[in-house]
Image (spheres, helix red, strand yellow):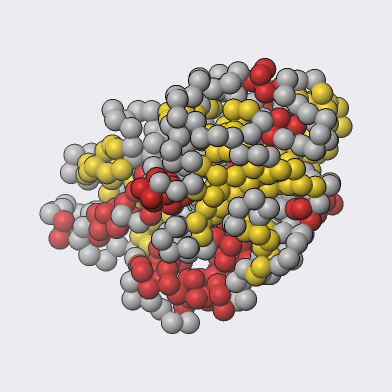
Amino acid sequence: MAFDSYRQFIDKLDAAGELIRISQPVATELEITALADREMKKPGGGKALLIEKPTINGKVSPFPVAINTMGSWKRMAMSMSAGTVEEVADELGSLMKAKPPTGFREAIKLFGTALELRHAKPKTVKSGPCKEVIHKFDAPPTRTEPWPAAAPISNLESQMSDSPPTLADLPILKCWPLDGGRFVTLPCVVTRDPDTGERNLGMYRIQVYDQQTTGMHWQLQKVAARHGRRYYERGERMPVSIFLGGDPMFPFAATAPLPDGLDEFLLAGYLRRKSVELVKCETNDLEVPANADFVIEGYIDPKEPLRDEGPFGDHTGYYTLPEPYPVFHVTAVTHRKDAVYPATIVGIPPMEDFYMGGASVKLFLPIFKMNFPEIVDIALPAEGVFHNLVFVSIKKTYPMQAYKIMHGLWGMGQMMFTKYMVIVDADVNVHNTSEVLFHLCANTDPQRDSIFTKGPADVLDHATSEIAIGSKLGIDATKKLPGEGFKRPWPPLIKMDEAVQAKVEKLVNP
Ligand SMILES: Cc1cc2nc3c(=O)[nH]c(=O)nc-3n(C[C@H](O)[C@H](O)[C@H](O)COP(=O)(O)O)c2cc1C
């Protein structure tokens, strides 16, 4: 079932006992984070929260805040209207098995075709609920002098308006004490390649500087950053539209590491089993989902200097320090009358994004397996904050196969950010970190079984000596073969006889 609004998804969570409604006022400054963090740290991800009266500097915002709505395996599956995420992954995998591709490029092409065949192609409609309230702004003159340091949060609060909402009226969180201000944490950012016209949907946080300007935190290696570089080279204003809410598959698709050129709205349409209906924006010619809760339209002017963005309490569990990013000017805010403001927080794991990232890995596992048929499973444990640490189990049949997998995966999309990759045999459950660590310790000679290499790094990684470049460690924790120079016999793993096990089970549980 496709959701017509974020509120409809929230009602479904409520009916399933997956939501806690908080009716007392809770401050958008730190308090919502403290509440949500408690929930996200509970085993399995706790419950979703609907903060009915979020306050901005003591004044109640007209819009409730929904948080942790996808922060458990159950809620992640519910957002896809499925019993489990694995069900969806299996269906997607079998779509592509009909005509197995011969390589990764072909697999991706086939993936796109498979999605289109399911009538997932987005379609344009004339209007939609996201335009129930429209507030337009004049574009300011191009700024050539350097920007001041980020506006202190108190400046923004004094700008709350009684007229239709500006950014200062939305319940945008200041998440952590040392954050440089308020950040929109679940924004779906739409951009377009000026050369090909191809669209991209990505999730890149935006820091609110004032009512009408924000930072745009697309990192160096992301698709929208590539689009942005082309606009800078051409010296043309870049249209950008940001939307929030609508179907929960929109923010999910925005975070999914789809290859450059594959439309995330196609993936969203497939997952919600209904084409995404798009409407043209009011002040630029990009399109956004008609059923979004909020739309923030605007542009980036390549003639303007970059501005410091941050600090921000990040996925890494540390603050990301200020770095220069493009400035986004808001030319319109439109919204549903009954809009819900969707938010998340990031910080020391586990957080909600563990389940969003994990669901992506499950969905894309069939594609990894097509290129590397020996892969059995892949896990990104919460401690590795997405891609820092990756466990891969393989059916090893020839010498050095574990190294082939390491090199192959480091070369695939955002797996380039992986700092530590551990390869284990097929019978190891990669989702059980303790089991992986046991095999890692037992099956390796550290010097012989590890490899260091270099590559691009996550720009959020504070430990690399230079931003965005770093080293990687791969560990082969599989059983060693004679062909790998291992001359000793490999001992059997200790296992109880099955019949004895069954007899004892009966004894204990008659
Ligand atoms: C909650 C959340 C916040 C994120 N914030 C950012 C961000 O600020 N900047 C960024 O480049 N990526 C961010 N990401 C990761 C991107 O959304 C992700 O890499 C996505 O695949 C990028 O899309 P693209 O490949 O189309 O560029 C975030 C992910 C999540 C789940």
Where residue 297 sits: x, y (%)?
63, 46
Residue at the (55%, 34%) spot, across then down: 141
- Residue with the most extreme front position: 141
Q: Is residue 495 left or right of residue 444?
A: right
Q: Is residue 312 left or right of residue 269?
A: left
Q: Quadrant of the C terminus?
A: bottom right
Vertical placement of 260 versus 157: above or below? Answer: below
294 vs 138, nearest the viewer:
138
- Tell me the quarter of the picture where residue 12 sits: bottom right
Residue at the (60%, 49%) spot, across then down: 241
- Residue with the most extreme right position: 23
- Residue with the most extreme bottom position: 98
Residue 119 appearing in the image = yes
Where residue 455 sits: x, y (%)?
27, 44
Q: Is residue 83 left or right of residue 339?
A: left
Where residue 508 sits: x, y (%)?
64, 50
Q: Quadrant of the N terminus?
A: bottom right
Where residue 245 sits: x, y (%)?
70, 49
Residue 13 appearing in the image = no
Residue at the (59%, 28%) spot, across then down: 209
293 vs 329, nearest the viewer:
329
